[in-house]
Every structure is written in C-alpha cells, then in structure tokens.
Image (cartoon, rainbow, N blue to C red):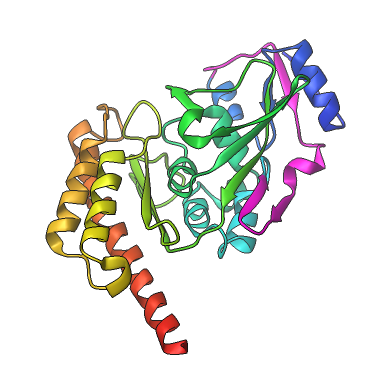
Amino acid sequence: MDFLRPASWEEALAAKAEHPTAVPIAGGTDVMVEINFDHRRPEYLLDLNRIGDLYEWEVGEESVRLGASVPYSEIMESLRAELPGLALASHTVASPQIRNRGGVGGNLGTASPAGDAHPALLAAGAEVEVESVRGSRRIPIDEFYTGVKRNALAADELIRAVHIKKADGPQQYSKVGTRNAMVIAVCAFGLALHPETRTVRTGIGSAAPTPVRAKAAEEFLNAALEEGGFWDNGKIITPSVAKQFAELCSGACNPIDDVRGTASYRRHAVGVMARRTLTWTWESYRGDRRLTEGAA
C-alpha cells in the first residue's frame, strides 16, 4: 500500500487523477477501521491532512460552507445555531477522540447507510461540493447516495465541502443504538422544519440500502399543516396527524435483519423517532412563534 501525501488541494486533485483508485483519508475514522479489519486493502491512500482549506468553514447569508474535514466537535461548538440538526447528530458520533478527528466529508465518502451525518444533511437540504482536475460541481444531497456504500462521485473527484442551508426553523435528530456511545446506529432520524417555505424535510439512516427521505410522509405533513393553518395559528399538531406521519416514515424504510437489530424493529423505531422529533420540533416552533409575537 502506497501513501500519497499532497501539500495542497491542487496536488491532491492531480494525485487523484493519476491514481483514481486512491482512497482519501483525513480523519481516518472510517477508512482505518476497514483496513484494520482487513475489509479493504487499497493500493493507494491519499492523505488530505495537510490541506488547510478542508478544515475551514464559512457562514454566508443563506448557507454554511463546511469544509469536508471540519471536525464534528467544531460543528457542535461553533455551528449549533446555524446547523442545529447536524450539531445534534455530531453529538452522537462515537467518542470525543473521534469527534475531534472525523468530519462530514468522511461520512459522505464512505456513504454507509449508518453514517450519523446523513439524516441531518438530508433534512437540511445540503449540496456536496466536489472537484477534480476537470472542474468542480455541486451534487444535491438527494442525488448523492447511489447504492450501498456508493455515491455519485466520479473516480477522479474529491469532496471539498458541503453547503448546508442555515436553519430557518427548529431541527431535531434522534438515533437508536445498542448502547449510548461508540456505537453504529441501529437506525436514525432527522427532521427539519422550514417555515420560510412552509415545508418539512426528513432523513432516515440505517433503515434502507442508502440514507433516504420519507417523501410520502413529508408530503402528507406539508398538506396537513397547510390545510389546518398550523403554520399561522401555532396550534398543537393533532395526534392523528402525528400518528399518520410516523406510519408513513416507517413505510419509507427498507431495512434488513442484522446483528444490531431486526427489520421490524427498525421500522418500529423509525416511526417512534418520527413522532417524537415532530413533537419536539413543533413545540420549539410554537415557542419561537410566541416569543416573536410577544416581542411585537
């Protein structure tokens, strides 16, 4: 196994173009596990640790540009207001040591359906900035996952950053694991309210071959909130609406039985998390609305 260590982004792109099978490594929290267990033996490792741009983030007017290697701990500390869903997901990642090393780019590159960041990125409506010597492009998160541990990257492309819309409403994230820390998700669920567009987005992890959205559930809830005037009147969401939303989220799953959980349990757990996160986010929205009205 050869170790490539570019000193700049341009050198990294050139190395990837010359060695398309080279596996990028930054935090190494996913790649090294696969290598240590002999699940993967790449011909080349492409070390990106010397490229400072990957560790930088910038808050713009409408979105956050998050470098691929910004550690989860930095997201938790510095971007909680702008990216609350992703910050909550970051809290659930492994241990403090891994949160100090791992970043969203690694989750995206590995594209495991159990990656902790994926549900939050789907719910927020992110775009993945990728680049090669041929140029750069942005891939909408809905088009990024193409199969089990497969993504839309071309062989010569690297992930440079993720563009995530700043939260315009409450967001939540919930994860079920076999214990409280250092665990791969049995299943996970992300939910984001977008009051500006009066829409809701979801993200489901570890309950299908790829991270997915519960689109039928979103469409149902969007219609129910609009028809009931909930965005304007701030009423509590009725139990029947919450129950139907949860059932539709369960129906969006296509899970398997494995050592961490059964398919039926995953469907059930996703429904429970969907109902709970909807309750939490809507209560936050109602509270924010009351504060706004009181200030006015």
At 60% across and 27% down in the image, what residue appears? Answer: 31
- Where residue 49 sits, quadrant-wise, is top right
At 37% across and 70% down in the image, what residue appears? Answer: 284
Quarter of the figure with the N terminus: top right
Where residue 294 sits in the image (x, y, percent)? Answer: 41, 88
Q: In this view of the protein, which residue sits in the foreground, 147 or 187?
A: 147
At 81% across and 37% down in the image, what residue appears? Answer: 51
The reply to whether the magenta stretch includes residue 152 is no
223 with respect to 44 (left or right)? left
User: Which residues, given as a range, are shown in magenta?
Assistant: 38-66
- Point out the residue furthest to the left here: 240
The reply to whether the magenta stretch includes residue 47 is yes
At 49% across and 62% down in the image, what residue appears? Answer: 168
Where residue 84 sits in the image (x, y, percent)? Answer: 50, 60
Q: Is residue 168 above or below residue 145?
A: below
50 with respect to 39 (left or right)? right
Q: In this view of the protein, which residue sits in the foreground, 157 or 22?
A: 157
